[in-house]
Image (spheres, rainbow, N blue to C red):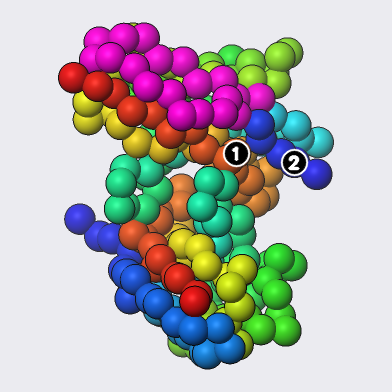
Amino acid sequence: EAEVAQSPRYKITEKSQAVAFWCDPISGHATLYWYRQILGQGPELLVQFQDESVVDDSQLPKDRFSAERLKGVDSTLKIQPAELGDSAMYLCASSLGQEPYYNEQFFGPGTRLTVL
Amino acid sequence: GDSVTQMEGPVTLSEEAFLTINCTYTATGYPSLFWYVQYPGEGLQLLLKATKADDKGSNKGFEATYRKETTSFHLEKGSVQVSDSAVYFCALDDYKLSFGAGTTVTVRA
């Protein structure tokens, strides 16, 4: 069964360091999402890609966060410099992206980030 | 903006008990509604969905009915099992997925 892959699963870093997370969506899925899930809260969308283009990054803290999906397949989310408040689960999801119909999002296992 | 409010947890039940998790929403349009489940150490999985008023979503013994008049989408299961222990998220999709805070459910044998 096709799955969304994410790595690493866990990351511990010190504040002011740079971190990067990788996501490989389900093959053929045009839309890719990055979410942040703070402990005890629901996921919040950080950025959405349609192929290689950013569709929505309104909640992405652009002074320290960046995301790319250069070839419209896998994606990298980077934080530089990391702050204590960035400790959270970072989830990647993908969907077929066939407008205008509903497209189910499939989630990866997430990367648990701890900033010390 | 669109938002989802769901019952706070944690909820602890005995096996075979009845489970209800309340969920209400605020939306300007006509969103689709979802319940996602997150098992320990895993990502979110879609549990069930409803795309219009009066639709009933069901899966694995769980049910939820889209009630436009009360703006609700309560999740129910008649007889829970230990394997149902997880965090449950209510969500709406009005061009973007918005999640509730999640309800942690623990089922004791």
**Does B82 sit left or right of B41 as displayed?**
left
User: Start and end of the magenta stretch?
Assistant: B6-24
Can residue B20 be seen here? The reply is: yes
Residue B100: which disc? 1
Q: Where does residue B42 sit, x and y in percent of width and height? A: 31, 52
How far across and how far down the image is residue B9, in percent?
50, 29
Say the numbered circle drawn on residue B2: 2
Residue A17, x across and y down, in percent? 52, 90
Front position in the image: B37 or A18: A18
Upstream in sequence: badge 1 or badge 2: 2
In the rendering, at what x and y percent does residue B64 appear?
A: 48, 19
Closer to the camera, A16 or B38? A16
Q: Find out whether residue A20 is within the magenta segment.
A: no
Which residue corresponds to the image point at 71% horizontal and 80% vertical from the top-left?
A62
Crowd tier of the residue under label 1, counting other residues whose Cα lies within 10 Å: few below 14, some 14–19, many 20 or above: many
Q: Amino acid at mark 1?
A: Gly
